[in-house]
Amino acid sequence: MKKIGVLTSGGDAPGMNAAVRAVVRKAIYEGFEVAGVFNGYQGLIQGKIELLQLGSVGDIIQRGGTMLRSARSPEFMTEEGRKEALRQMKAHQIDGLVVIGGDGSFRGAFELVKMGIPCVCVPATIDNDINGTEFTIGFDSALNTVIDAIDKIRDTATSHERTFIIEVMGRDAGDLALWAGLAGGAETILIPEEGYDMDEIINRLQSGTGRGKKHSIIVVAEGVMSGSALADLLKEKAGIETRVSVLGHIQRGGSPSARDRVIASQYGARAVEVLGEGRGGVAIGMQNHKVVDYDLEVVFAPKDHTLDMGLYKLSKELSI
Ligand code: ADP
């Protein structure tokens, strides 16, 4: 292993820059050269590759987004595209690759592993939905963004005595909705893992109103239904008026939290260590507060990233 490549791919997440910085600095510390691949797998196919130095990653640890930029690459999904990517890697003498992204990006890396390129994958997605790791880079920052929004919305909810529905990201995973809902003191949290019972939601709202409660916050993960669909249902079934706030892409932006910067630094450095040991086909993650590496195939096994249902139960108990 002489030269390590690094790319960011798929949906961006705060802390990707901190991970890129860690890969570059740790690799140089270990005596490797580092090639930055711009625009994810698409850039790999197009040869958008540059040698990075210590200074190339200066002043980025605090920035959101990714200096290497990210992309989705349909071309890389084809054998032809991947052969071209491999040709570019050989031409640039890249011996191993660190892929920073979500599970789609990990699947792309696995294809390269099958073609003989050692790849190590660093989980970065605000959804926190990757098998084998308790935390992905970006989740904590997104969580803080959502809580900030909930706090602000609560001010107006209180002033106007309104029920607000806040729609957050999470198609299959309810982590963001659950953690944000709990931390933001939401009365009701809807997550894809649990489904929902309209009668129960209505009962909770009505019994709150009966006790003199003047406002409520409902957090719904987009994978359950849209905020506006929920608003329609509440109006239709119980005549309950709500206001809807869809947080959308602001959840992906902003300066990474301290925690995300720390885990991004740890994951990025560990990825370089693993490649240095000549291993590939590996994902980095966190288990029981320790940074670990594990077989990439764990990521693709039937979903085992389980939400902390203890937190879900607690959120219900605390919002009676
Ligand atoms: P994320 O990494 O955030 O889950 P995507 O699912 O969009 O994002 O995946 C990012 C990119 O990874 C895709 O655009 C594609 O280039 C590559 N990729 C995803 N799945 C595969 C696959 N099965 N085979 C090859 N490449 C893939």
Image (tube, rainbow, N blue to C red):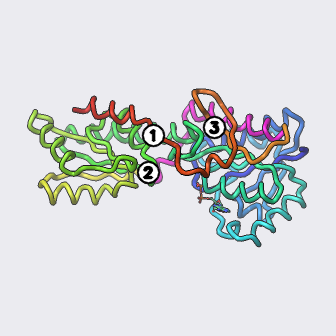
Image position, residue 130 (x, y; %) = 57, 46
Q: Check disc 1 and give the amino acid type.
A: Leu
Q: Which of marks 2 and 3 is nearer the N terminus?
A: 2
Badge 1 density bin: few <14, some 14–19, many ≥20, Cα 10 Å: some
Relative to 213, residue 252 above or below? below
Residue under the point 42% across and 45% down: 174
Is residue 148 in view from this perspective? no
Question: How far separated are the C-alphas under marks 2 and 3?
Answer: 22 Å
Assess whether mark 2 and mark 1 are in contact (beta carbons under 8 angstroms): no
The alpha-carbon separation of the residues under discs 1 and 2 comes to 15 Å
Q: Regarding ligand 1, which quadrant of the image does it lie in?
A: bottom right
The numbered dot on residue 227 is none
Q: Is residue 180 left or right of residue 140?
A: left
Residue that carries the numbered disc 2 in the rendered image: 169
| Amino acid marked by disc 3 | Gly
Residue under label 3: 285
User: In x, y percent, where is residue 137?
Assistant: 59, 40
Q: What stretch is highlighted in magenta?
A: 248-276
Any part of residue 274 in sight: yes
- Residue 306: x and y, percent? 48, 41
* Quarter of the image where one finds residue 235: bottom left
157 displayed left or right of 144 = left
Label 1 or label 2, whichever comes before in sequence order: 2
In-front residue for pair 214/129: 129
Q: Name the residue under label 1.
A: 307
Q: Residues within 10 Å of mark 2 (few under 14, many from 20)?
A: many
Q: Does the magenta stretch include residue 64?
A: no
Measuring 89% from the left and 44% from the top, which residue is drawn there? 1
Q: Quadrant of the C terminus?
A: top left
For residue 10, what is the image quadrant?
A: bottom right
